[in-house]
Image (cartoon, rainbow, N blue to C red):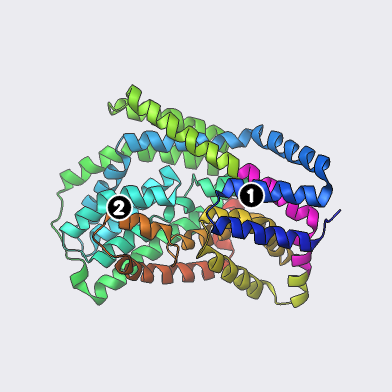
Amino acid sequence: MFATPETGLIGLVLLFALLISGVPIGVSLGLVGTGGLIVALGFEPALIKAGVIVVETLTRYELGTLPLFMLMAHLFFSANASRDLFDAAAKLVGHRRGGLAYASIGGCAGFGAINGSSLATAATIGLVALPEMRQRGYSDALATGTVAAGGTLGQMLPPSGALIVYGIIAEQSVGKLFTATLIPGISQMLFYCLVVWLLVRWRSSIAPASERATWRERGQAMLRIADMLGLLCLVLGGIVLGWFSPSEASSIGTVGALAITAWRGRLTREVLFRAFSETLRTSGLIFLVIIGALVFSTFISVTGLTDAVGHWVTGLALGTIPTLIVVAGLLLLLGSVLDGLALMLLTTPILLPVVESVGMSPIWFGIFITRAMEIGFVHPPLGMNLYVIQGVAKDVSINRIFKGVMPFLASDLVHLLLLILFPAMALWLPGLFGQ
């Protein structure tokens, strides 16, 4: 009927308007996608197509990976994972100038790898790390900026909820995505450490040195996280080495988390009920978003908008790197006003064919768009991590937090450029392990 690129463009504008007005992302995607299919195909074919997508999505085996990893994270949270991870890092490097900032980044990396959520990582580590740093005389800007930026490691280190969602909507291997994100995730963490090192060398007063922990205290702190780190290495190592699939790994991780929580004496009926209820609530919301995204993606594909955009970009003959820089600029622009998951689901159906047309793989684009999405969490004016941190440190102004995160944001932009210039950062490990 009206299956034209113009119809797809109108659908995009409507979706963007709904998101800006505060309509939930899953509802927005589903409404625009279904309505667009009705306009493009007719009422009955559209409903049949949407129904098939719903059934096929809910019966996908790999979809079970997401709630299981979430349950694992909630159980570890009950077992004081965030405090133990930060405490271990603080005992190891806290005596150095800026040591607690390094410890915050390490704690964010560790808890982010368990939790897979940027906002939850920033909030949880912030509750533990910010009081410690401010009590030791750290600058408010450095303390808040470090935790806000460190929180973005939550989606870049596996198991990442964003990469699971991307793998489903782009029909890519979640295991390969988890392997591909290891080098970008670890290098991002090292970039943040470099920023702290440079800031402390520039102005030593912003991060005073503190007392050195004894080797006995360090050993005790490491023992408290040995069980969690061991399980994490088993889960991630098993995926990378091909011992088991991500779905099997999530099952092993959940059983291990149950055992560790019980071993620590924290597995109560209340803990289990809270973990199950939070997992079900969050998973239900994400499933709604995934279904809406797939319906919307089908609508965009039916209208031919993706092909039209691809032909337009190809016609510009910019070359691979300039095209990717333009794509990065678009993602960063939209990321400043959209929620991260909304950004991914809105742009993937349109930009993935463009990226493939210049010779880049869908796996690389999954890491790239997740990295750009994470920058949006600390990018003004939205920067949700920054407002999460202000909720933890209520007496610190948002302008002060923005100022503190700026050096980390600069390092993020450099890191994203390196990912464009050196795609092997994301593709070398999967190739090495034959994935």
Q: CA distance from mark 1 to mark 2?
A: 32 Å
Say the numbered circle drawn on residue 299.
none
Q: Which residues are magenta?
A: 290-311
| Mark with earlier residue (1, 2) | 1
Residue, x 44% and y 31% (percent of image)? 277
- For the residue pair 30 and 55, the one nearer the viewer reads as 30
Q: Is residue 351 above or below residue 31?
A: below
Secondary structure of the residue carrying numbered label 2: helix
Residue, x 20% and y 54% (percent of image)? 132
Q: Is residue 94 left or right of residue 269?
A: left
Q: Is residue 432 above or below residue 311?
A: above
Q: Is residue 145 above or below residue 57?
A: below
Q: What residue did someone put label 2 on?
A: 126
Q: Position of residue 340 (x, y in %)?
A: 52, 56
Q: What residue did someone put label 1 on?
A: 29
* Occupied quadrant, residue 346: bottom right
Q: Position of residue 46 (x, y in %)?
A: 79, 43
Residue, x 48% and y 70% (percent of image)? 413
- For the residue pair 134 and 222, the one nearer the viewer reads as 134
